Amino acid sequence: MAVSSAALVLAPLLALGLGAPPSPAPPAPAPAADYPLDGDARDATGLGDDGVVVGARPAEDRTGRPGAALAFGGRDLVDLGSRTEPQVLTVMAWVRPTRLFRDGAILSKAAPAAGRDRWLELRVDGDGRPALLLPSMDRPLRGPRLLAEGRWSHLAATFDGARAVLYVDGAPVAEVAAQPWRAGPGPALLGARPDPGGKPKKAGAFLEGRLDDVRLYTQALPAWQVLAIVHPASRPPPSGGSELADDAADLERISALAAAFDRAVVRREPARLREIEAKVLAEIDQELSEARTERGHGASRRDVVRRVREAFAADPEARGLEALDQRRSALAELSAAAWQELLRDLEARREGPEGPRRPRPGEGGGWGAGRRDEPPAPLPAPPAPAGPRAMEPGRFDALVAAVTREPFPDGQRRVLDTAMPGSWFTVAQVGTLVDLFTFSRDKLEVVRRARGHIVDPDQAFQLYERFTFDSDKNELRNILQP
């Protein structure tokens, strides 16, 4: 793994926040579909059929490479054919909108098995915000801020069977509880929303802008892994078991030594450089000692450790660019090996003793496992979250029915007051209750009664869209303020 001397000069500047630090990118689990969009719609996984480009043109990607992205002019799309959406998923893409304030689909897949006019869709919404729509959602999950026209942004969304999370540039910006759905085959597009019947002339929500690196996973990636894909130098959590903690600590020490090495080189501090090189050799000797006592590092990691020792011990007084480059390259190789080992431990912990099962080409209609004529396997129950839990869907539906049966607002509020003690609600559930009332004063009263019973108060901004007039929105703000 060669690292140029120019990279050594740039490394400390990048580490100060002017770009991604020069540590190796953590590998993510293999995606079920990967469209680099390098001027075409090839699926880089080799597991499914390639898409067909209709009108979109090759364009520069976010790094300036010509022909490494696709530009969509408002009537263009990529036809992915009929696919089956995963019921647990991560979808992500780089997008550079050139026109906001109209719906622009990034990846959109019709879900007729889930009901009429249902989609799985990651998009730029009509108000300029990123949005996710699942087949089980009546309203999209939206980010709180507008995207910038003419600027690349990374959008991602995950769904673990119980909760959807939306990310912008690697950071989570919105989340909501959501229900699973029945999956089945249906038309899927990039850059537009398909007609549920698959009629190309009835496609809509055309994107105006560029797309790059669209990926779909059949699992909900954790937040740190989404961040690691966008910013390859980000770190995994240093907890989760003694072996994981040890490997995470190894990675932190190696990364710190590499950063200190870079600073000493750029600042031309020979005494500090000798001190860091001595620490590297001490770290390597400790690694080799642990390997001899069967700590558990794989053979490949031990081979890398030996090569690092050779690079640092060959000629301790050598300070030429070639020698420095070899030592920094050796540190980068060791950091990559530490990443691989940590992620293997994480995968083993997640998958259990049987290990992961890799999908076969063409299995499950292209992406997921569901079929129209075959109900999907039941989803595993998600782990119980810490803190209060929102009202279960069956009980909430019964509450909505009881409120609806009351002919007058006083009776409806009486039903709510009876259900409130000991109950908790998501913001989405509160919004459903608000919609049961006609007049603004009654809607606001529902929010006032439910305010102290909301499990996700950070999502309360979504309630503003339930009100039309500024006076009502100002009153809502007063109610929601702590």
Image (cartoon, rainbow, N blue to C red):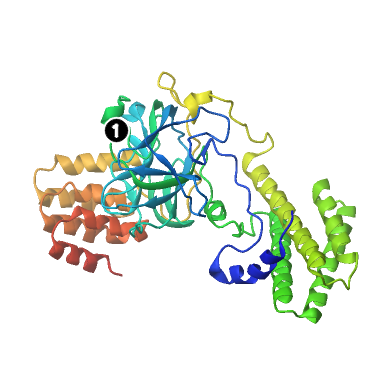
243 shown above or below 161? below
The 10 Å Cα crowd at callout 1, few under 14, some 14 to 19, many 20 or more, is: some
The answer to which quarter of the image holds residue 308 is bottom right
117 shown above or below 460? above
- The single residue placed furthest to the top in the displayed view is 373
Residue 36: % across, % down: 52, 41
Residue 98: % across, % down: 34, 52
Q: Is residue 335 left or right of residue 96?
A: right
Residue 201: % across, % down: 27, 28
Element type at marker 1? loop
Q: Is residue 328 left or right of residue 282?
A: left
* Quadrant including the C terminus: bottom left
Q: Is residue 196 visible?
A: no
How many marks on residues? 1
Q: Which sits in the foreground, 281 or 221?
A: 281
Residue at the disc numbered 1: 203
Q: Is residue 173 left or right of residue 408?
A: right
Q: Is residue 9 visible?
A: yes
Which residue sits at x=52%, y=40%?
Answer: 219
Which residue sits at x=84%, y=72%?
Answer: 278
Question: Of the residues shown, which amino acid type is indicated by label 1?
Answer: Ala
366 shown above or below 385? above
Q: Is residue 257 left or right of residue 459?
A: right
Q: Which sits in the foreground, 44 or 234?
A: 44
Which residue sits at x=50%, y=48%?
Answer: 66
Q: Which sits in the foreground, 195 or 111?
A: 195
274 shown above or below 392? below
